Image (spheres, rainbow, N blue to C red):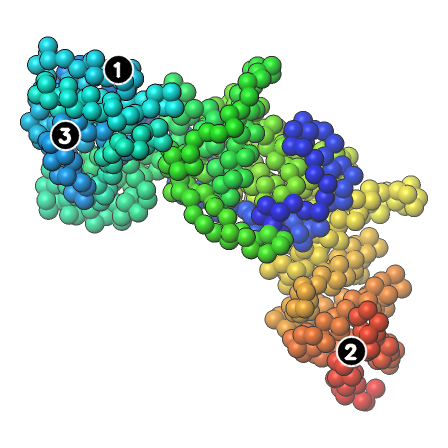
Amino acid sequence: MSGQGAEKEPDTPLGDQADGGPADSDQPAQEPWAALRDLDAHAPKFDFQGVNRGVAAQHVMGDVITGGKVENHYNFGGFGSEPVAGEIPAETLERLAEDFVSEGTVFEELLERLRHDRVIVLMGNPFTGRRTAALMLLHRLGALPVRALDRDVSPGGLSRQLTSGDGAVGQVLFDLAISREQPLREAHLLALCSRMRELGSYLVITTEVSPYVESTVAPATWHPPAPAAVLAALLPRRTGAARARELLALPAVAEFLSRERQIREVVQYAAVLAEEGRERIEGYSLEALEQQVQEWFEEAETPVQLREKAFLIALAAFDKGPYALTAELSDTLFKALRSTGDDTYQKPIPVFGTHIGKRLQKARARRYLADEETEWGPVTQVQAEFHDERVAPMVLREVWTGHPAARPALIKWLDGLSVDGRPFVRTRAAAAVAVLALTDLPSAMALVVEPWAGAKESRRQLTAVSALTLAHRIGAPNIPRIVDAWSTSVQDPKRCWVGVRALGLIGPERPAEALDALRTQARHQYDKKQAQGRVGGDEQVADELPQSVALLLLSEARDAAATALLPQLDGHASARALALDGFLTACERQDADRCPPLLDGTTRSAVASAAVSRFLQVALNDRRTNERAEDALRQWVRTADRNPAAESALSDLLPVLVAGPRDAARLVHLLDTLQGTDGRPRPAVTARLRTALTRPLAHI
């Protein structure tokens, strides 16, 4: 199934779906095999290592504050996020010089260029140390004192700020704003170079990578030193060389350096290592990550715009998915977030926004090419993923629990995703809700999962099933209890159907308990039909019961499931019917030309072999099921004509099905009268199977 390819169902505008409009209420539910396939193919591999906020099962997610709490606020280059104008204290420059690391950078080349040109535009990404590098260029050149210029200036008006009245030799302008309206032109730099020579001064301008720089301007690109080099240089100054070598050899340090790091985090980690608190050393990697996520969503503290916040949330849901899809759906979330508290907000969404490279850099993510499986075959796509696999669940948790005002918009967005025509999108919506359930089960159930379970759209119900299944996989508490209660419900057929389907998906962990719940609902349906006549019962629930039994019989827990199911053949009529119908549904499951899964299981397990033969014997001799059982055998024989493994398994199975002459005659007749596919002649394998059947039975 496609990661993006839509199923062959009519499309509906996402806005109608998100508002609970007519999405697919008349469409049949997706088959359980397809649902399981989509879950396995598209569910993200969330990393919850160390994530802690609230207490949920064995996972602790976030800050559970039981006493005092120490918060770290990073200042970069000795300044806050908005450096002010004025002379920079000499002691600040000296302190920065002590810790500055230029190994592996072009610092020396930049120094010579500044000495010659008098002006340098230092272009680099945020948090790469470009501000510190600018100050150190002036410091190493001896251009002191250093004055920071007011950044609220256009490129064309910068030269008017430059005066010699304060005696400054070094001038620095942090984060010059370059835009379409105020681009940086060659004429601006020529004027600045002339002015600097007149004053006998030097100027360094820092700015982010921008497309609005005239092609004749040659900015200097700043790339930071390697985090390992920075840590190796800083730590000995704080602890001594011998102790630094011991600390750098710690596994926690190797783990910290194995992930993408900002220089400010490395500098802080050197201080943490110097403190030598084991718990802090081992936990700092996660601490820095949590602080980054919180910083992204602190409105007053961060320059991340609302549209980019929406992109971060979408990337958390679609991590390692196609970038174009993530960007598309992030704008849908942006629209919902922007209208929060003001439904009349009609300002249009910009068609063109941040460049993909800059957007992913701010999100601490990367793009790469990968093959995406679709229903038309593999397709190469541009994918996007966070550098650190722990970020995705952390972002979802932070938005859900740290910013409750965003919940209505987030819920509306997830509602739209739950009925999207693309299985990948629906599965990722379910995975996002699973993380919310792990974080805050009561709210996630009440606000998302329960409304989906009771919805009229089959896709929304299926997404509720997927959410429960994935929540259980990642350790959310009490999911089996919820599923058991829903599957045995006699009041709400829609929720009951969701529970029954979910039992088939999470049941392999506890097959006996799952079958008990299915048997209870089968008895309820039987009694209801007996009381109300032929039209009684809940048809959709009744049809789903054997599907879930079949899922259990074809799972890794097939032996335990078969063992728990066999006694039902001698139980109540409803339990016997459930066992036989579930078994035959599993028999009918085909996988192209491969050996049918249930038949293949007989070659791998003596328990499975004995169970299959027993079920088939009963089904062939039951007036209600014998025709269906014979049809299943015919399909197996046709597959055996193309698959040697299936032929070998059938050769062993058929003789075991014979308890007397009547059984032998039935099977011989089935083989002798079997037609090939589409009216073709009898398959050649039937003669070989007939020989395999009759040779051991010559005495009968």
Q: Is residue 570 left or right of residue 213?
A: right
Q: Is residue 316 visible?
A: yes
- Counting residues from the start of the chain, the first of labels 3 and 1 encountered is 3
Disc 3 residue type (three-letter):
Asp
- Counting residues from the start of the chain, the first of labels 2 and 3 encountered is 3
Q: Quadrant of residue 451?
A: top right
In front here: 671 or 18? 18
Q: Residue at x 13, y 24 (%)?
A: 202
Circle 3 SS class: helix
| x, y percent for residue 230 | 19, 40
Q: Is residue 361 left or right of residue 157?
A: right
Q: Residue at x 6, y 27 (%)?
A: 142
Q: CA distance from mark 1 to mark 2?
A: 88 Å
Circle 1 SS class: helix
Residue identifier under label 3:
117
| x, y percent for residue 59 | 46, 39
Circle 2 SS class: loop
Q: Residue at x 21, y 16 (%)?
A: 159
Is label 2 or label 3 in front? Answer: 3
Q: Is residue 518 left or right of residue 243?
A: right
Residue identifier under label 1:
157
In front here: 164 or 148? 164
